[in-house]
Image (cartoon, coloured by chain):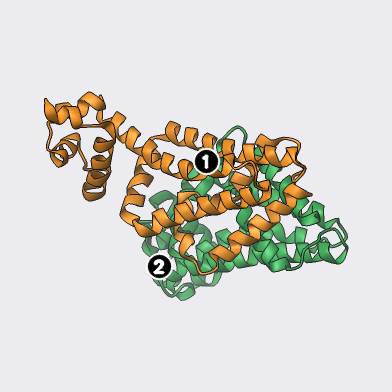
Chain colours: A green, B orange
Amino acid sequence: MAPTETLTAERILEATEEVLRRHGPAKATVVDVARALGVSHGSVYRHFRTKAALREAVTKRWLDRTSDALTGLVTETDRDPGARLRDWLRTLFEAKRRKAGDDPELFATYKVLTDENGAMVNAHLDELTGQLTRIIEDGVTDGTFTVTDPPTTARAIFDATQLFHNPAHAQQWTEPDIVTEFEALVELLMRGLRA
Amino acid sequence: MAPTETLTAERILEATEEVLRRHGPAKATVVDVARALGVSHGSVYRHFRTKAALREAVTKRWLDRTSDALTGLVTETDRDPGARLRDWLRTLFEAKRRKAGDDPELFATYKVLTDENGAMVNAHLDELTGQLTRIIEDGVTDGTFTVTDPPTTARAIFDATQLFHNPAHAQQWTEPDIVTEFEALVELLMRGLRA
């Protein structure tokens, strides 16, 4: 049973992503994933008990890549919270734009997967607004921001920047003025936080 | 030719909307519209030279209904610009929510039509941000707002409220917290404008 021993969940998820990209989310099967790995489909099922569980796990991995890229900005408590908040919003926008622009097929694939995994997406959005809340709280503590209810304000900022992170707006991310618009909006929000 | 004489463009557009709702945008034809009006399709073509022109005109009429509902707030120059700006954003959100909630089939129909009439939609969005610009300019003049570039700020406010007016977000308009989220965002934006 050597192949099973070296067959990690991470390797299966990598192969699943590649199979989804190649076959599309409607056609990709667990058998395709097993074939790509040179193992039996039973070996895959030992790690992920159903096809739905596998699709859910690969979706979580994709979403986690975004939140992991942002975590560092939350914990840099020695830096100005205003600068961290701007960087957080910019990093999120850039990560999304890159995902959509560099690999449109994979981006479209994950749009289908996130649509079918609403609970996973909601947990991801809660994590992101939780990160924003912590930066805002740091800003309240050191007097940078004047905010009475950080979680509500975090949500408002996340809502205000939908155009720059929600995949529903991906088509607009290639417009020539999009970065200028983004900077103008962030500026307005920062003024609101400092008022 | 009595039917042609009483056949106004407005009557044709009303009938077209009803035909689109009934048959769906993929199947509705000019012959269906003519039949609904009890006239020949030649009579319809006398007002709208092509099927595309008719679909464009009915889309414009739908978009104009929204901008017309907001015009009054732009010209009420005796009222506080802050209150007018809030009312403008609220009226827009409420108008969109009502359209989506009261008649989901017609809303879905117009989503297809607006997707195929991008230039018309862009003109509509320019009109809306133009209205916002005028209210912001009034606020700069009377000292309510501290804004250096009203058109850029108008665009930032319009961008910031995508979640509450862009049909791509219609599904979220029925969420229980949506109005609270809207109010929190407007509050943050108003603080940014006044800072």
CA neighbours of label 1 inside 10 A, class few (<14), some (14 to 19), many (20+): some
Q: Which residue is drawn at 42% across and 60% down?
A: A33
Q: The residue tagged with tag 2: helix, strand or loop?
A: loop
Chain on which label 2 sits: A
Residue type beneath disc 2? Ser
The residue that disc 1 covers is B71
- Identify which residue, B21 or A7, lies in the foreground: B21
Q: The residue tagged with tag 1: helix, strand or loop?
A: helix
The residue that disc 2 covers is A40
How far across and how far down the image is residue A131, in percent?
A: 70, 64
- Identify which residue, B153 or B9, lies in the foreground: B9
Q: Are marks 2 and 1 in contact (CB under 8 Å)?
A: no
Compared across the picture, whether A27 is left or right of A109 comes to left
Mark nearer the viewer, 2 or 1: 1
Which quarter of the figure has residue B42?
top left
- Identify which residue, A33 or A150, lies in the foreground: A150
Compared across the picture, whether B51 is left or right of A8 comes to left
How far across and how far down the image is residue A191, in percent?
A: 77, 50
Residue type beneath disc 1? Thr
How far across and how far down the image is residue A101, in percent?
A: 55, 41
Q: Is residue A166 visible?
A: no
Cα–Cα span, label 2 and label 1: 66 Å
Task: Check chain identity for marks 2 and 1: say if they share one.
Answer: no
Q: Is residue B195 above or below residue A38?
A: above
Which quarter of the figure has residue B97?
bottom left
Q: Is residue B13 visible?
A: yes
